[in-house]
Amino acid sequence: MTTTDTTAPTRADAQALDAADPLATFRERYLPMDADVVAYLDGNSLGRPLTSIAESWQSFTAQQWAGRLIRGWSEGWMDLPERVGDELAAAALGAAPGTTIIADSTTVNFYKAMRAALNLRPGRRKVVLDRHNFPTNRYVVESLARDLDLELVWLDPPIEGGVTPDDVAAAIDEQTAVVTLSQIAYQSAYLADAPAITRIAHEAGALVVWDLCHSVGSTEIELDAWDVDFAVGCTYKFVGAGPGAPALLYANRRHHDRLDQPIWGWLGRRDSFEMEQGFLPAAGIRAMMSGTPPLLGLLGVREGAAVIAEAGIGAIRAKAIALTELTTAYARENLVPLGFSIASPLDPARRGGHVTIARADARELSARLIDAGVLIDFRAPHGIRIGLSPLPTSFTEVWDALDVIRRLS
Ligand SMILES: Cc1ncc(COP(=O)(O)O)c(C=O)c1O
């Protein structure tokens, strides 16, 4: 089924897609939802829990924490930010060992990565960013602009689209220090051409900081091959590591001898446990650390990375495309006639793992959908975001949800 088909997909079509789905059995790895849930279409916001995460937390608590107590910190807990970073990097980031840590929130990591990137481009004071990036990214950059007297160059892509390489090429100049964008736009799911944009930034002597929140675990990423400078991203969405799980932070090895981030915590210091006066950054990616690793969250990331590695990110991306194709085909035939627009790219090559449909009454309709057990999310001003997390979601579940949307609209 493709967006060029002109008949609405039927429930039987969705069942046939499930029957042929090579990832279908991964659904059984997740803990069950409440019986009133018709469909969970918010895995791009909060992923469903793997049974293995519950088991990992249980055994960590009973054996490691209860048994080893504080000895655990020197028996491996302290290294988990880098070890689990390597595991996620191998499964989903196209990044070599030693380039990624799991720590803090995306917001904090973004601040650190932006400051580190700006510190590598002294004398340049422009940052290129876009109006439809996630609020945290815009606010952090605005606070940096206030503190460091930066000039912000705002791109204004269409809300149903995203930033193109041409947009960046037109905005960048020899004063640009950093270009920062989301690889997948949180509203439209527009999938930016990260390698091309990174190249354009580098040709102008600027660095890039990519936000991977909506792409990690849903689409292919090749941070090393694309020569990305810094990247950050959530692990509680498609990685499914749990509510508030710590975020990823990648720094290209090329920058490791000059990593200068602003939150000088004890665990980013060389020889942390010597408790010395003054701050000297630790070697390598560890310089991006600040405080104590959140162990339970890290174990969630470990399980999420393991399941992505097992399924294969290529197969996950292929299913994401098939799920979003089903959704856009259904929406075009059955929801557009009811006054909706499709506020996501129609070209699957430019679309991430969710589809947004828009109508003026989206806020009120979203509340009714959630009451009916169709868990989508509303995104102001008029968007209903249909998140299609490939591993726990079936085609039939999505079709049933779309049919509820049609009936309640
Ligand atoms: C694209 C994007 N960037 C940043 C964030 C902020 O992440 P956190 O609240 O974990 O700091 C989010 C959260 O949903 C996001 O979607």
Image (cartoon, grey):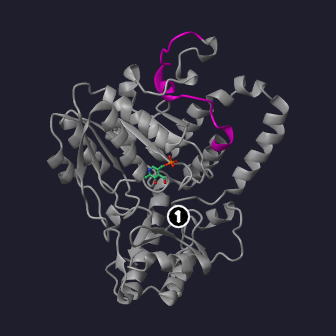
Q: Predominant secondary structure in magenta?
A: loop
Task: Report x, y in % for residue 116.
Answer: 38, 29
Residue under numbered circle 1: 390
User: Label 1 crowding class (10 Å Cα cut-off): few <14, some 14-19, many 20+?
Assistant: many
Task: Report x, y in % for residue 312.
Answer: 52, 53
Name which residue lies at 44% across and 36% down: 250
Task: Report x, y in % for residue 64.
Answer: 79, 35
Most distant residue in the front direction:
146
Camera-side residue: 391 or 232? 232
- Is 366 situated above or below 44? below
Camera-side residue: 356 or 217? 356
For badge 1, the amino acid type reads Pro
Place residue 346 in its image quadrant.
bottom left
Task: Report x, y in % for residue 60.
Answer: 77, 40
Note whether residue 211 is visible. Answer: no
| For residue 131, side relative to residue 316 (left or right) | left
Camera-side residue: 84 or 342? 342
